[in-house]
Amino acid sequence: MYPFVYTKPADTRAAITAGARGGRYIAGGTTLVDLMRETVERPDTLVDIGGLPLREVRATASGGLRIGALALMSDVAAHPRVRSAYPVVAQALELSASPQLRNMATIGGNLLQRTRCAYFRDVSAACNKRRPGSGCAALEGYNRSHAILGTSDACVAAHPSDLAVALVALNARVHLLGPDGERGLALTELLLRPGDTPDREHGLRPGELITAVEIPPHPRPLLSGYLKVRDRQSYEFALTSAAVVLHLSGGVIRDARIAAGGVGTVPWRLGAVERLLAGARPSEQLWARAAAVAADGARPLRHNAFKAELLKRTIERQLRTVGGTR
Ligand SMILES: Cc1cc2nc3c(=O)[nH]c(=O)nc-3n(C[C@H](O)[C@H](O)[C@H](O)COP(=O)(O)OP(=O)(O)OC[C@H]3O[C@@H](n4cnc5c(N)ncnc54)[C@H](O)[C@@H]3O)c2cc1C
Ligand code: SF4
């Protein structure tokens, strides 16, 4: 560790002021403290937002759900409305990290956690995300856990959050508060692909704080679920994952929203799969046909070519689980 200033503002306005002056927000600290200990990150000032009143989970007037950015992962996973209306969210959270971590970690911190790429976390390795222009050790290194979709020549790190995959499938947005006031961003605008600037991971302006995540209303009945494939049953990030959200009525799929994790540099929405499903009747053949296009556009690396096939199988299995074959 190294010396830094710690401050705990009494209210949200004071937090924004401290953030706008260059302070770095810390919520549960389960990612940031690790990175500071390894000196991967060296913020001068920590602004502890853990005590701010941003923990509420409530239904919105339009029939969606608003989740405070400081709600704990464990509380959101256990929330009755989340469990009944959006099982995909509860399952994604329960399959994340460990119970101890979920009792500390927050929804906002989960979305902004940084990649698990081992080269990013090793300050002696070349890494464009940590030190722009230094190169990417993963490109020719051990890249088994890295992304096959949305990569660039500068960075191939996979996005680590399970929750973000479920939220992308649900078209969620984040509410932001910053020095210039409030605004909203779709999750797909919040989390950025690496391109030539992998060090720029999110669309927040300086000093902006995530105050809440909002899931918009969806047609009912809504079927949903999350499947995570990993090397061991607990405490492990996804090799592949599938968030499946289906609206069925009259035996027909009226709306399909499918996203994948573990394979993209951001949570990956599978538009081609969704288009094949929309308007069709569930059947084993439909699930197989839709899953066959799940990895279209993939650019596998030396050690992770298996992910393309694994992704197709993950999607097919989860379509069958969520959609059945009625
Ligand atoms: C061993 C281990 C295993 C894990 N396994 C998984 C897993 O399988 N799946 C998974 O999804 N995650 C996993 N995680 C990650 C874990 O879920 C995250 O560490 C946690 O969600 C981060 O939340 P936090 O509140 O502790 O964030 P912090 O560490 O406090 O902050 C993380 C980042 O978010 C920023 N930030 C936090 N809150 C806000 C806000 N409201 N507005 C703006 N910026 C903010 C901080 O500045 C920081 O950059 C694992 C972590 C560990 C250590
Ligand atoms: S994949 Fe990205 S995070 Fe990993 S070493 Fe390369 S540039 Fe760094």
Image: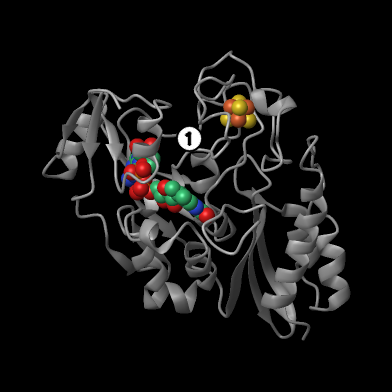
Q: Residues within 10 Å of mark 1 (few under 14, many from 20)?
A: some
Q: Is residue 79 visible?
A: yes
**How many marks can you see?**
1
202 sits to left or right of 56: right
The residue drawn where x is 77% and y is 71% is 279
Q: In terms of depth relative to the viewer, which is nearer, 3 or 76?
A: 3
Residue 148: x percent and y percent? 74, 41
Residue 241: x percent and y percent? 65, 58
Q: Is residue 239 above or below residue 243?
A: above
Residue 249: x percent and y percent? 67, 82
The residue drawn where x is 54% and y is 29% is 120
Q: Is residue 19 above or below residue 31?
A: above
Write down the quadrant of residue 283 in the picture: bottom right
Residue 280: x percent and y percent? 80, 73
160 sits to left or right of 60: right
SS of the residue at dot 1? loop
The residue drawn where x is 55% and y is 61% is 170
Q: Is residue 180 visible?
A: no
Q: In terms of depth relative to the viewer, which is nearer, 116 or 295?
A: 116
Badge 1 amino acid: His
106 sits to left or right of 319: left
**Which quadrant, please, contains the C terminus?**
bottom right
- Extreme top residue here? 133
Residue with the mark numbered 1? 202
The residue drawn where x is 32% and y is 55% is 104
- Extreme left residue here? 10
**Which quadrant, please, contains the N terminus?**
top left
Q: Is residue 169 above or below residue 32?
A: below
Colour scheme used in the picture?
Answer: one colour
